[in-house]
């Protein structure tokens, strides 16, 4: 699609999760989310690793600027699998160095964590 940016092309392949003004539409139906994830993950299957495709699919579905995937085992071993960009990769590295952040919290607590990065300082 000439002239289309990467997210609009991927989003179109996911079944049109962008509104006319480019806003990401909220999808709460788990089966719809999984169907979008599967469609997006199938893109470029012959040229990109599955972890990279899943990471990009999550970015598109969530409407995030960046996403990374890190695998934890029952101990302290963490293995970063993929990041959508250099900023996401740097944030994942920072979590590893500091020993805190949304990935560690999710792993410890067993609950999802979303983190918005903006102009407002962290209240901690």
Image: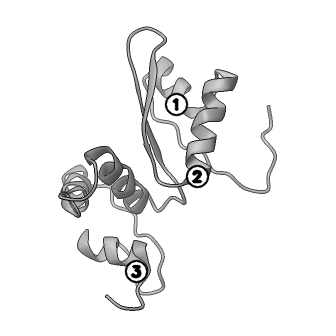
Question: In the rendered image, which residue does mark 3 sit on?
Answer: 19
Query: Marks 1 and 3, how far apart in space?
Result: 30 Å
Residue located 22% across and 63% down the image? 43
Which of labels 2 and 3 is toward the front? 2
Question: Looking at this rendering, what residue extends furthest in the top direction?
Answer: 75
Earlier-in-chain disc, 2 versus 3: 3
46 or 88, which lies in front?
Answer: 46
Question: In the rendered image, which residue does mark 2 sit on?
Answer: 86
Q: Residue 11: percent from the left, percent from the top?
A: 33, 72
Question: Looking at this rendering, what residue extends furthest in the bottom direction?
Answer: 2
Question: In the rendered image, which residue does mark 1 sit on?
Answer: 103
Q: Secondary structure at mark 3?
A: loop
115 or 93, which lies in front?
Answer: 93
Earlier-in-chain disc, 1 versus 3: 3
Q: Residue 18: percent from the left, percent from the top?
A: 38, 76
Residue located 49% across and 11% down the image? 76
Residue located 28% across and 55% down the image? 48
């Amino acid at each position: 699609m000439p002239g289309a940016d990467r997210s609009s092309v991927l989003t179109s392949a996911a079944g049109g999760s962008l509104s006319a003004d480019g806003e990401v539409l909220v999808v709460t139906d788990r089966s719809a989310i999984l169907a979008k994830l599967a469609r997006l993950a199938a893109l470029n299957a012959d040229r990109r690793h599955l972890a990279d495709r899943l990471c990009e699919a999550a970015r598109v579905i969530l409407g995030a600027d960046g996403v990374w995937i890190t695998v934890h085992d029952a101990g302290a071993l963490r293995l970063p699998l993929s990041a959508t960009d250099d900023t996401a990769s740097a944030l994942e590295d920072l979590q590893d160095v500091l020993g805190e952040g949304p990935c560690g919290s999710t792993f410890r607590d067993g609950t999802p964590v979303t983190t918005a990065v903006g102009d407002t300082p962290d209240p901690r």
